């Protein structure tokens, strides 16, 4: 397949190389022409503008810093929209704004082309190895037709729903992932301040529930209708542990701000009468605040 690729930086560069390794012909463009040199040496063609990329390749991918850059490449002078047409597909792998992606898709699809948002996760290591998770939003038939393109850059290929859904999934994932990292940082600092060596704390994280009974193994029970009234670990006990952790943090002078916020959520659950239920019953608070139902 002939594929256009715009944005050959730390993520886009390896992704483009993997497309070539999979046998696809590449038409490349980047504001910094030097970034395309390795790809051109391997046989890729150079295009002077996004418009030229779109005219020469029926499928175009972009990997750009954010929504402003995506819109500039797509809608600016000599932008993709001027080269796309019926039969073309534009795939944006950047992480952006769902609402802006949907508006952009309207402009792109007015040309007769189709658009998918397909943000990726896995960092430069995953980009180099071709093991990225790819969360795709847009027409399902188009997604299936272009699955070989996604499989050239990743392994975890997910169709998340209509246009914008891929970006929603990516932003929700990153919010969970990045917040968890900060909680781990707070806990590691607390352990060190209170006298536990970092290597020992890492071993504890691996060997105890956090490492062996991760929340990801428990979430399916929630999504598919877990009975919170039958506890594995009660909310009362969880609240007790977090409260004791906060007491230690205060004594040690190592604040755990996110854990303090989690404790407030647990206390609200206890006030609702869920203390003897499973600690995951606080999912109901998240549902209530967001006005959605997670559990089926």
Image (cartoon, rainbow, N blue to C red):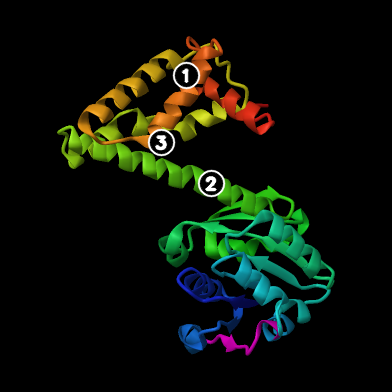
Q: Earlier in the sequence, mark 3 or mark 2?
A: 2
Position of the C terminus by quadrant: top right
The local crowd at label 2, few if under 14, some if 14 to 19, many if 20 or more residues have their Cα within 10 Å, is few
Residue 89: image x %, image y %? 73, 69
Q: Earlier in the sequence, mark 2 or mark 1?
A: 2
For mark 1, does the 10 Å Cα neighbourhood hold few (<14), some (14 to 19), or many (20 or more) residues? many
Please tell me the numbered disc located at residue 173: 2
- What's the residue at 57%, 75% (across, down)? 23
Q: How many marks?
A: 3
Q: Position of residue 51 (x, y in %)?
A: 71, 83
Disc number lying in front (2 or 1): 1
Q: Secondary structure at mark 1?
A: helix
Write the start and end of the magenta stretch as one range: 43-51
**Disc 2/disc 1 C-alpha distance (Å):** 26 Å
Front position in the image: 94 or 259: 259
- Is residue 204 magenta-colored? no
Q: Tell me, for residue 50, which label it has, or none.
A: none
Q: Is residue 58 left or right of residue 232?
A: right
Check disc 1 and report the residue beneath it: 267
Residue 102, quarter of picture:
bottom right
The residues bearing labels 3 and 2 have C-alpha atoms spaced at a distance of: 18 Å
Q: Which residue is mark 3?
A: 258
Please give left or right for residue 239 compared with residue 104 in the image: left
Q: Against 69, is 40 above or below?
A: below
For marks 3 and 1, the one nearer the N-term is: 3
């Amino acid at each position: 397949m002939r594929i256009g690729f715009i944005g050959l930086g730390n993520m886009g560069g390896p992704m483009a190389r993997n497309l070539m390794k999979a046998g696809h012909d590449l038409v490349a463009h980047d504001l910094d022409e030097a970034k395309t040199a390795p790809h051109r040496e391997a046989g890729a063609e150079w295009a002077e503008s996004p418009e030229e990329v779109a005219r020469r390749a029926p499928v175009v991918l972009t990997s750009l810093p954010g929504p402003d850059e995506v819109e500039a490449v797509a809608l600016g002078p000599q932008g993709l929209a001027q080269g796309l047409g019926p039969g073309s597909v534009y795939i944006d792998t950047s992480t952006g704004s769902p609402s802006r992606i949907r508006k952009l898709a309207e402009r792109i699809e007015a040309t007769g082309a189709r658009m998918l948002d397909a943000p990726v996760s896995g960092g430069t290591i995953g980009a180099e190895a071709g093991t990225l998770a790819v969360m795709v939003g847009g027409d399902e038939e188009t997604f299936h037709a272009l699955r070989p393109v996604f499989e050239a850059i990743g392994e975890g290929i997910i169709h998340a729903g209509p246009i914008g859904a891929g970006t929603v999934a990516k932003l929700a994932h990153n919010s969970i992932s990045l917040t968890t990292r900060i909680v781990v940082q707070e806990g590691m600092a607390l352990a060190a301040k209170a006298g536990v060596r970092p290597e020992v704390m890492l071993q504890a994280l691996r060997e105890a529930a956090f490492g062996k009974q991760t929340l990801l193994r428990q979430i399916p029970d929630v999504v598919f209708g877990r009975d919170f009234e039958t506890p594995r670990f009660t909310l009362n006990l969880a609240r007790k542990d977090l409260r004791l952790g906060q007491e230690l943090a205060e004594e040690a002078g190592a604040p755990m701000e996110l854990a303090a916020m989690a404790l407030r959520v647990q206390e609200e659950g206890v006030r609702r009468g869920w203390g003897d239920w499973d600690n995951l019953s606080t999912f109901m608070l998240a549902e209530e605040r967001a006005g959605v139902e997670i559990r089926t």
